[in-house]
Structure formats: C-alpha cells, structure tokens
Amino acid sequence: MGLTEQLVERAKKINATIILPEANLDDRVKEACEIIIKENISKIIIFGKKEEFSKLLQTSENVKIIDTETFNTEELATQLYELRKHKGLTLLEAQELIKQPTYLAMMMLKNCMADGVVAGAKFSTADTLKPALQIIKTKPDKSVVTGCMLLTKGEETLVFGDVSLIENPTSEELKDIAISTAEFADKVVGIEPKVALLSYSTKGSAKSEMVSKVQKAAELCKNSNYIIDGEMQVDSALDKSTAIKKGVTSEVGGNANVLIFPDLDAGNIGYKLVARLGGYTAIGPIMLNFNKPVNDLSRGCNVKEIVNTVCITKLQIE
C-alpha cells in the first residue's frame, strides 16, 4: 500500500466532519464530495441548495447540506463582530461578511460545528486564509502559519516548505517553518524527518546575506527535537556522495526527506518542478499551525488532490 492509500485508510478511522464550502461552486469539489461519501472517507458539510447535488449527497447521513440563503447566521455574525470589533468591524459589516462561504465556514469551525475546512479550488488563497487568520488564528506556541507540500512517488516521500505563504522569511521564521514542517512529517505523515535548510551554498561555500540567513536559521534549530542541518545545496541534501564531498557530515546529507527553501519563489517553483517533471503526486499546500485544521487548495487542483487534502485535514485534528 502506497503512502496516499495509507493516509486515506488512517483518515477513515477518524470520526470527524470537514466543511467544503465550494461544493456548489466547483464541479471538482462536488465530484470529490461524492467520492468521499462513496468510499466512506469522512462526514462532510457543504453549502448550497439540495437540488444542486446528486441523490447520493442529498440522501447520505454523512452529508449536511446548508442552504446559505435560509441558514440562520445571526448568532455567528454577532460572534464575528465581537471577535473583530477591536479592529473596527461593525455589526453590519459582520452580517455581510458571514454571507461569504469562507467566513461562514470558519465561524462554524470556531464553534465546533465541524472539525476542519478545505477550500481554495474556487476562492483565492487570500479569500481562504484571511478569514482563517482572523477567526481560527495561529496556535499560541507558534509564530507563523506556514504552507508545506507533501510529494510522493512509489515508496519515496518528500515534504517541502514553505511553498505558499511566507515570501521572504527571516532566519527566525525559517527556523519555525523547519520545525513545524518536521512536526507534520513526523506526526501526520509518519516518517522520521531529516530536514535540510536549502541554499545555493553548502557549509560556507559562498558568502552573502542570503546564505547568512539560512546559516543563522540552522543555528537556531540546533536545540529542536528534530535532525535539522544547513545550509546546503539540494544535491548535498539528496545525494550522499555529493554531501560527503561538500563537507556535510550530519545524517541529513544525502538522506533529507524534508526540504526547507530559503524563500517562497524557490519553494513554489521547486515543488512544481518535482511534480511536473519528476512524476511525483503533490498533496497540498497543507497549512500548518492554525488552532484548528484549515487547508487551502490550489485553484489548479484535481479531484484526487481534493480528496487527499480532506484526508490530511482529518489527520491534523488534535
């Protein structure tokens, strides 16, 4: 059984409900919902009118369909106002915001009406994550929300971070990205993380402000619970003989399975190259460090990726 199949089987065992607020807006999400119900992967909540959905979704006891035009959002709007009034939000503005599917989904999640949210097939990252940051917020012991990508091919598994959120992280943010991504690889994916902080330099082979940033991040990671090393070029991270030649002596050299990129350009380009040219299956972006699981799909996602993201979201429930 491959990693994806293992994740699906593990997710099936978790009794949880995931909101997919775009099911009536995007046919890929609607098709994914049907697969989720047919294969008994998860309970789901979807928005729209019953007649917009198949008989399977209309009649399944594992599906709750909410007609947003008739659903009573008064209490949720009031809560949203109380939550954001210190930022200048008025009650009238809260009543308008709650009509947006992502704001409604996040307020339902906050009120324990569901266990996770998966959106982004139709809505932009900003439309998905802004209400999540405002309502669900970051875990108190974490400084950043970060986005990683899970890549699988056969028995090979890699996790890349950050691929979707933090454009030019500081050394401190790189440290937090590395540790959070390692935690995800360990606790959710189930692999022993060996984390490489990537650069165009290996162990001081080049000198620049960009290299120094990664070197400092590596220093900050020394007291973590995970094996994290850097700075190193990607060939040193993935090929043992190259790592030895370039002076990487840690267990990470040639064995890295978690790759942390120095900026968002590198991370986003890197995972898409690996997926498109290397034939890896990409699952994500997967959001880390929210108080409750929220995941933002790529607008170019396919049906299988939506199903896989629902499974990951269930596995993130604490």
Image: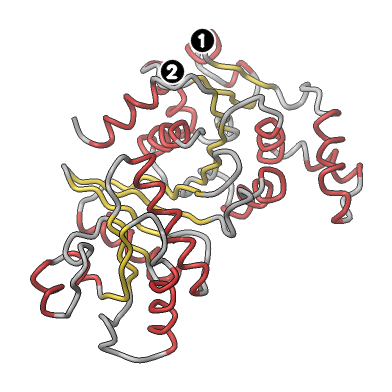
Q: At which x and y percent is residue 38?
A: 39, 16
Where is mark 2, residue-wise? 37
Instruction: Give the side of residue 111 with respect to residue 82, left or right.
Output: left
Q: Which residue is drawn at 38% across and 39% down?
A: 188
Instruction: Assess whether mark 2 and mark 1 are in contact (beta carbons under 8 angstroms).
Output: yes
> What amino acid type is highlighted by mark number 1?
Ser
Nearer to us in this view, 198 or 4: 198
Figure quadrant of residue 181 = bottom left
Between 232 and 48, the one lying in front of the other is: 232
Instruction: From the viewer's side, name the closer residue of 20 and 69.
Output: 20
Spot occupied by residue 260 in the image (x, y as percentages of width and height): 37, 64
Provide the residue designation for mark 1: 60
Distance from disc 1 to disc 2, alpha carbons, whole Å, reads: 8 Å
**Does residue 173 sit above or below 258 in this rendering?**
below
For residue 296, above or below residue 163: above
Tell me what residue is drawn at x 16 percent, y 64 percent.
254
Residue type beneath disc 2: Ile
